[in-house]
Image (spheres, helix red, strand yellow):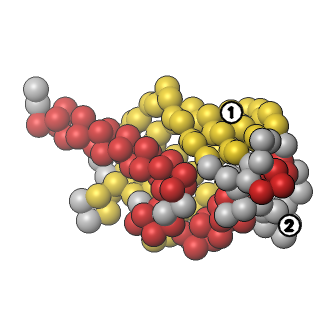
Amino acid sequence: MSEATLATLLAERAIYRNLVAIARAMDNRDWKALGELCAAEVTADLGTGELRGVEAIITLLRSFLDACGPTQHLLGNVLIEVQGERASSRAYVSDMHLGSGVHEGQTFSTLGDYHDEWRLVAGCWRLQHRCKHNRGHVGSYAVLGPGPDHWRA
């Protein structure tokens, strides 16, 4: 195996691990860990408009997840393309959100596709941009927190 091939395989593995770590950070509400997986100038569009910076992304996620019960973000059919110190990935996401309090027993779930851009920063792969393409949902939006002020289901 060539050195270039090995470097590509190691990069793919590191990016895959970070994809999983981001999903787990959301489910564990570990916002510090999520922030450490992102580049300083990370951007995203998660279905509510463009976000700039890790704090904006975490604020949006918390607006939905802080009032929600347990969640699980499962990833599959992951494709990763590495080109030097940049990479892109696509991963299906199926997420389940359970209601809590007055919404206990209710669920909300989406099927989507994460389109991510990655950058090598000081030897570590960091999320540079995420766009979530929602393909559909089932259940009640009431399971989620209110979302950002400008968001409407």
Q: Which mark is residue 111?
A: 1
- Mark 2, residues whose alpha carbon is within 10 Å: few (<14), some, or many (≥20)? few
Secondary structure beneath dot 1 equals strand
Residue type at mark 2? His
Please give left or right for residue 125 compared with residue 114 in the image.
left
N-terminal of the pair, mark 2 or mark 1, is 1
- Mark 1, residues whose alpha carbon is within 10 Å: few (<14), some, or many (≥20)? some
Please give left or right for residue 70 compared with residue 80 in the image.
right
Determine the residue located farthest toward the right in the rendered image. Answer: 152
Q: Disc 2 designates what residue?
A: 150
- Up/down of 117 relative to 33, above or below: above
Quote the CA–CA distance across marks 2 and 1. 23 Å
**Residue 121 locus on image (x, y percent):** 32, 63
Secondary structure beneath dot 2 equals loop
Q: Which mark is residue 90?
A: none
User: Which residue is found at the position 42% from the left and 64% from the top?
Assistant: 33
User: Which residue is found at the position 11% from the left and 37% from the top?
Assistant: 3
Nearer the observer, 95 or 9: 95
**Residue 120 locus on image (x, y percent):** 32, 57
**Residue 96 locus on image (x, y percent):** 66, 39
Observer able to see residue 104: yes
User: Which residue is found at the position 86% from the left and 66% from the top?
Assistant: 150
Which quarter of the figure is the N terminus placed in? Answer: top left
Q: Give the total of numbered labels.
A: 2
User: Which residue is found at the position 61% from the left and 58% from the top?
Assistant: 44
Observer able to see residue 39: no
**Residue 36 locus on image (x, y percent):** 40, 66
Residue 97, by quadrant, is top right
Please give left or right for residue 119 compared with residue 111 in the image.
left
Please give left or right for residue 54 compared with residue 84 in the image.
right
Residue type at mark 1? Leu
- Up/down of 32 relative to 137, above or below: below
